[in-house]
């Protein structure tokens, strides 16, 4: 069974039937236009599903444009793909920057299943839903695009699906034994009661009192034996 025939029922991910999953690496890279172009170019043999911005999970066609800001997201998106996708480069700018050209030249299997370039079309800028009712290339160019698409999809569907990493087990809580002499479990030693001291009565004929030795610690007094 050829890829285009498989796309009619679309054996795309894990042997399941469904449309060709198309997602962009970021906003405004021409994802919706790409989905419509692939459908129209195959004369309806390929059904597509526009998934918007790629956030992980199964994907068949990954879309970028030819600007440096979009290419900067490409490596992270490819790393998240369960298997190498077909990369479609939408040329939204007439000129390709040298850094973009160098990055795209590095990509090949097994990183991607293949690469298709959709050339810059100035008339598409005026359309609400490009490419409109007709494609701006010849039937021969459409056949070449379909052949390249079929070759890439055949290779992609033969690749194993990368399983996501197993979640790490939660860390084991280490409970330290509470020492018996812990401040939380031991009782503080009560302070020794201080002796009460009688304060001498002041007035005429009262005996003067002076602190006894060590009165600063014990609070004692002694009698002088003199009247005042």
Image: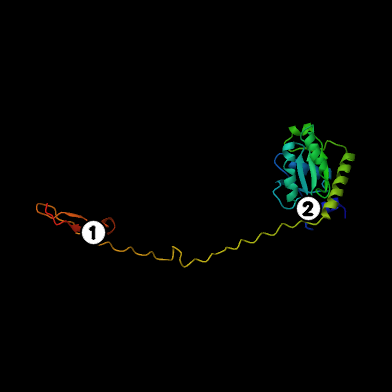
Determine the image quadrant of residue 93: top right
For residue 145, above or below residue 170: above
- Residue 214 image point, x, y percent: 27, 57
- Residue 159 image point, x, y percent: 82, 55
For residue 89, above or below residue 174: above
Compare residues 84 and 181 and report the one nearer the observer.
181
Q: Residues within 10 Å of mark 2 (few under 14, many from 20)?
A: many
Left or right: residue 6 versus residue 171 is: right
Q: Quadrant of the N terminus?
A: bottom right
Q: Secondary structure at mark 1?
A: loop
- Residue 141 image point, x, y percent: 88, 39
- The first of marks 2 and 1 along the sequence is 2
Asked whether residue 72 appears in the rendered view, the answer is: yes
Q: Which residue in the structure is indicated by mark 2?
A: 83
Front disc: 2 or 1 = 1
Asked whether residue 29 appears in the rendered view, the answer is: no
Compare residues 149 and 4 and report the one nearer the observer.
149
For residue 33, above or below residue 205: above
Q: Which residue in the structure is indicated by mark 1?
A: 220
Residue under the image location 21 percent in, 59 percent down: 197
């Amino acid at each position: 069974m050829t890829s285009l025939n498989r796309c009619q029922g679309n054996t795309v991910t894990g042997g399941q039937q469904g449309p060709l999953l198309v997602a962009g690496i970021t906003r405004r890279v021409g994802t919706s236009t790409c989905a419509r172009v692939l459908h129209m170019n195959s004369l309806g043999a390929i059904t597509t599903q526009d998934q918007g911005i790629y956030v992980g999970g199964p994907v068949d066609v990954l879309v970028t444009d030819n600007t440096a800001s979009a290419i900067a997201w490409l490596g992270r998106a490819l790393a998240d793909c369960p298997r190498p996708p077909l990369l479609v480069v939408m040329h939204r700018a007439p000129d390709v920057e040298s850094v973009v050209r160098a990055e795209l030249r590095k990509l090949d299997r097994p990183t991607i299943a293949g690469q298709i370039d959709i050339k810059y079309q100035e008339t598409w800028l005026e359309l609400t839903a490009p490419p409109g009712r007709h494609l701006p290339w010849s039937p021969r160019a459409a056949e070449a695009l379909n052949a390249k698409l079929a070759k890439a999809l055949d290779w992609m569907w033969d690749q194993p699906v990368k399983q996501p990493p197993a979640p790490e087990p939660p860390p084991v809580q280490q409970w330290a034994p509470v020492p018996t002499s812990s401040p939380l479990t031991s009782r503080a030693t009560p302070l020794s009661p201080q002796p009460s001291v009688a304060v001498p009565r002041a007035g005429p004929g009262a005996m003067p009192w002076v602190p006894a030795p060590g009165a600063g610690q014990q609070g004692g007094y002694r009698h002088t034996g003199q009247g005042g």
